[in-house]
Amino acid sequence: MPDLSSRQYVIVHGYLASPDAHWFPWLKEQLEQRGATVTVPALPSSQAPQPDAWAEALDTLLPHLNTQTVLIGHSLGCVTLLRHLMFRPKGETVGGYVLVSGFDKPLQTLPELDAFTDSPLDYEDLQRRSAFRASVFSDNDQIVDPRQSQALAASLHTTTLEVPGAGHFLGREGHEQFPQLLDLLTHA
């Protein structure tokens, strides 16, 4: 089992989620067993999220990032963490980021989230922020079209991992655990 005692992981949840949802508690426990520090912040009003409120929450929770910090986003948490990274001081880097069912363009299925994708991301800046960048998506995601996750991955030049038949990686779809993600993180 790898020693991750120098690492800090931050799991950024998405729309309608909380720190106790889906695979977040399981992943937190698995990483902590390997010595890591893990935070799963509760972002405000996940039932009706606002980009400014989520950005402010991350600024408060993560005032400093460093090369031992690995950010993990799920769905809406992906574009949220990418924007957080973009607005950090120039030259500040992180140990990595992983985007699970990520998107950065409006979703036909969830127009109420369009405010999160109103302005474009600076892909070049986000590539410079970390050498370890990964995207995880499924071929049958009904919430975020897999092609959107793939397009974001291509724009950021991330490593990609497609998990067949995994949907949107929700607890109700059977994703209380996420061994593929744990493997990706511990072998990065």
Image: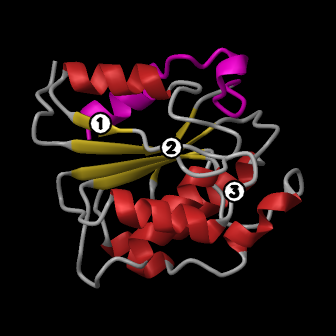
Asked if residue 170 lies in the magenta stretch, the reply is yes
Q: Which residue is mark 1?
A: 38
Residue at coordinates 55% horizontally, 55% vertically from top-left? 78
Which residue is located at x 66 percent, y 81 percent?
119
Q: Earlier in the sequence, mark 3 or mark 2?
A: 2
Indicate whether residue 13 is drawn in magenta.
no
**Residue holding disc 3:** 49
Q: Quadrant of residue 162?
A: top right
Residue 157's label in the rendered image is none
Amino acid type, callout 1: Val
Report the residue marked by disc 2. 42
The residue nearer to you, when weighing 117 against 55, is 55
Say which element carries label 3: loop
Asked whether residue 9 appears in the rendered view, the answer is yes
Judge left or right: residue 153 versus residue 36.
right
- Residue stretch rendered in magenta on the structure: 165-188
- Image quarter where the C terminus lies is top left
Residue type at mark 2: give it.
Answer: Ala
Give the residue at x 24% y 25%: 32
Q: CA distance from mark 3 to mark 2?
A: 12 Å
Q: Residue at x 66, y 50 (%)?
A: 45
Query: Relative to 37, does residue 155 appear above or below in the rendering?
Result: below
Badge nearest the viewer, 1 or 2: 2
Q: Position of residue 184 (x, y in %)?
A: 36, 34
Under circle 1, the secondary element is: strand
Q: Position of residue 122 (x, y in %)?
A: 50, 81
* Image x and y of residue 53, in percent: 58, 65
The count of marks equals: 3
